[in-house]
Image: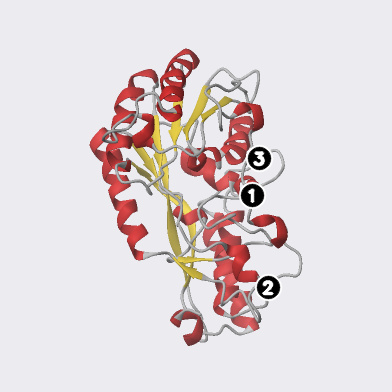
Amino acid sequence: MSDRTNSHRLSDGARAAVWTLAILALASVATATYSSGAVASKPLVQLAQAVADGEQNDSLPAITTPTVEHALRDHVNLGRCSAFHRLRSEICNYGDPKGTKTVVVFGNSHSAMWVPALAVAAKADHWKFYPVVKESCGYDTYSDVVPKLDPNNQCTSWYEWARTVIARLHPDVLVMGSYTKTTYWALGERTVIRQLLPVTKRFVLLSDSPWIPAPAQCFLFAHATQGTCLRHEPQLRIHVQEETQNVAREMHVQYLDITPLLCDAQLCPSVIDGIIPTADGSHVTPQYSRFVAPAFDMGLNLTGSNTIAITSVTVPSTSTSTSTSTSTPTAPAQ
């Protein structure tokens, strides 16, 4: 349990005040809505509430989506629309078939996990949306920058095909997730960006996920609570994210930090509005990817010219509670 959890306990009245203040603070800045009535701020408010519940050491919900039993293996599965274990895949439109603009997501599982969110965003904004993905590959293997790597390996071979596919799609926006667990990941990302940048009007590099322990595993411990399962974002991962942002800056592409969709004030809940957010601490579950779609879309800003940084907004504290923050897109980020 975190020191923050041990030090502060919110009363029921204080929690209600925090909840009300969070909604009021976000109402003026998060106005994007969808035909379903979903508001961009909703998942962010729920994230802040999950952190508050963890700090109060609330009990874990009896029912979750996905279930605890299935959460550890509940990854986004694109079937024939992914090249997982294959050299080719079908090119599938997950967006609006009548869209006049196109967004493509490229990369491995850390890109594919955002397909449910991007599908919601693309349909809401009336864009075509195509995933061009192959899981279990690093960007350094895609681009063949690993020393003594067989250039005929499956990842590199697929990437050569993927480059031609993306060029044919003429994406208005190309989105690429980050995977920072390989030795030459930064060099690989720079190389891939350099090669793909000419085929798109706008390139967006996403940050990597928090790399925390698998949430569902925590549920299995005796006497587990939302407090004991409230994880701290690893400090090493924070440094790696700074390097990812440097890659985007050096390559003159846009950057979107997705951390605030999963963690608030460096605290990462294991359950948010009844949803287990990641399967293994690094791959977003399809249910949570869809849940955060409004906020993800607002940050990606498909219909705009630049990403909008998802940052924390401090909610005024009461005399009996700590300052609780939530995350909401604010200023443009390069």
Q: Where is residue 43 in the image (x, y as percent from the top left)?
A: 60, 55
| Amino acid residing under circle 3 | Tyr
For residue 60, the mark is 2
Q: Residue furthest top?
A: 168
Cα–Cα span, label 1 and label 2: 19 Å
Q: Position of residue 81 (x, y in %)?
A: 62, 27
* Residue located at (33% from left, 19% from top): 198
- Name the front one of labels 3 and 2: 2
Cα–Cα span, label 3 and label 2: 30 Å
Cα–Cα span, label 3 and label 1: 13 Å
Compared to residue 280, the image places residue 198 above or below, namely above
Q: Where is residue 263 in the image (x, y as percent from the top left)?
A: 49, 61
Crowdedness of circle 2 by 10 Å Cα count: few (<14), some, many (20+)?
many
What SS does tag 3 mark?
A: loop
- Left or right, residue 99 beside residue 206: right
The total of numbered circles placed on residues is 3
Q: Earlier in the sequence, mark 3 or mark 2?
A: 3
Q: Earlier in the sequence, mark 1 or mark 2?
A: 2
Q: Can residue 249 be seen in this view?
A: yes
* Residue located at (50% from left, 27% from top): 104
Q: Judge by depth and name the residue closer to the eye, 24 or 184.
A: 184
What SS does tag 1 mark?
A: helix
Q: Which of marks 3 and 1 is nearer the N terminus?
A: 3
Q: In which quarter of the image is the C terminus?
A: top left
- Left or right, residue 209 beside residue 333: right
| Amino acid residing under circle 2 | Leu
| Amino acid residing under circle 1 | Phe
User: Label 1: which residue?
Assistant: 291
What SS does tag 2 mark?
A: loop
Compared to residue 28, the image places residue 143 above or below, namely above
User: Label 3: which residue?
Assistant: 34
